[in-house]
Amino acid sequence: MTAPLFDDLKPQPERLYGRQRGHPLRARQQRLLDEALPRITFKAFDNPLQGFSRSVSGLFLEVGFGGGEHALDQSERHPDIGYIASEVFENGICSLLSRIMPEGEEMTAAPPENLRLWSDDARLLIKDLPDQCLDRAYLMFPDPWPKARHAKRRFVHPENIRQLARLLKKGAQWRIASDHPVYQEWVTEVMQAQPYFELASLTKTRPEGWSPTRYEAKAFREGRQPFYWTFIRRP
Ligand SMILES: C[S@@+](CC[C@H](N)C(=O)[O-])C[C@H]1O[C@@H](n2cnc3c(N)ncnc32)[C@H](O)[C@@H]1O
């Protein structure tokens, strides 16, 4: 792969590629989407710290939470932080909701006080959040889109990097993990070519304080070596 020059990359397509629906939903899953999801959906764009049912002192954002293991664990580890977790894949959203909403209480159970979901393209969320509102961002095992002609679909892309640079406070972390060699090379090259973030660490073992994810487990089962990057928003 040739080194991508940051300003020369083709723009991202507006439409989102990748699966948004999988198996047909069971009755409980449909109830979770109809009854529980609206109560936990993030809506507080003007003042994101107000978007939670407890007072929070900071804001973390996760793009593409998959089954939600990482989002739940991180939001529990940081009870004073408002955690916005985004995912477009319906079965993934149901998987997280089914863990936090007891069976039979989909219509009434209160969501975790510091966790809110965004069940649409994360790019629509990040373009509407105010400047420097985020204390951390996570991108765990993003879809790699390994074919060169699909490179513009990758989340690590100038437009998203510029948005996250606008949103993250100076000194805030952006954590990225990937097990795909093409994406690993891509992150290395694209992030070296941008001016907003500096690399704080790159490791091949999951750093202390990070949570496991389903895709990480799949990578280990299938013999792939994840990379874990921490980038810091430059002052
Ligand atoms: C390879 S999976 C990894 C899931 C999870 N982070 C993990 O590590 O198990 C990538 C996920 O990102 C989601 N995704 C991709 N683009 C997205 C976007 N623009 N907004 C929200 N979610 C997105 C996909 O639906 C998919 O579930």
Image (cartoon, helix red, strand yellow):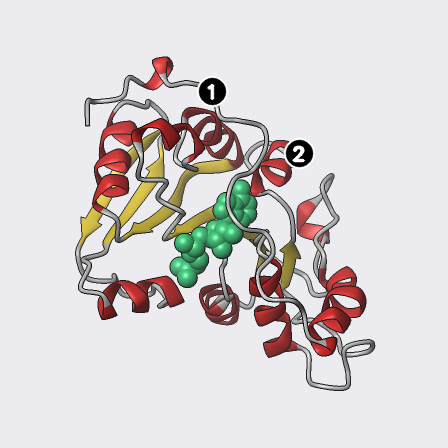
Residue plotted at (26% across, 48% down): 180
Residue plotted at (57% across, 61% down): 22
In three-dimensional space, the C-alpha distance between marks 2 and 1, rounded to whole angstroms, equals 19 Å
* 225 with respect to 147 (left or right): left
Residue plotted at (57% across, 71% down): 95
How far from the left and from the top, in percent, is residue 41?
72, 57
How far from the left and from the top, in percent, is residue 148?
30, 29
**Residue 235 visible to an observer of this rendering:** no
The correct choice, above or below, for 153 with respect to 33 in the image is above
Nearest the viewer among 85 and 221 is 221
Q: Secondary structure at mark 2?
A: helix
The three-letter code of the residue at mark 1 reads: Pro
For label 1, the residue is: 11
Answer with mark 2 or mark 1, whichever residue precedes in sequence.
1
For label 2, the residue is: 128
* 16 with respect to 108 (left or right): left
The correct choice, above or below, for 194 with respect to 138 in the image is above
The three-letter code of the residue at mark 2 reads: Asp
How far from the left and from the top, in percent, is residue 70?
44, 65
Q: Which mark is residue 235?
A: none
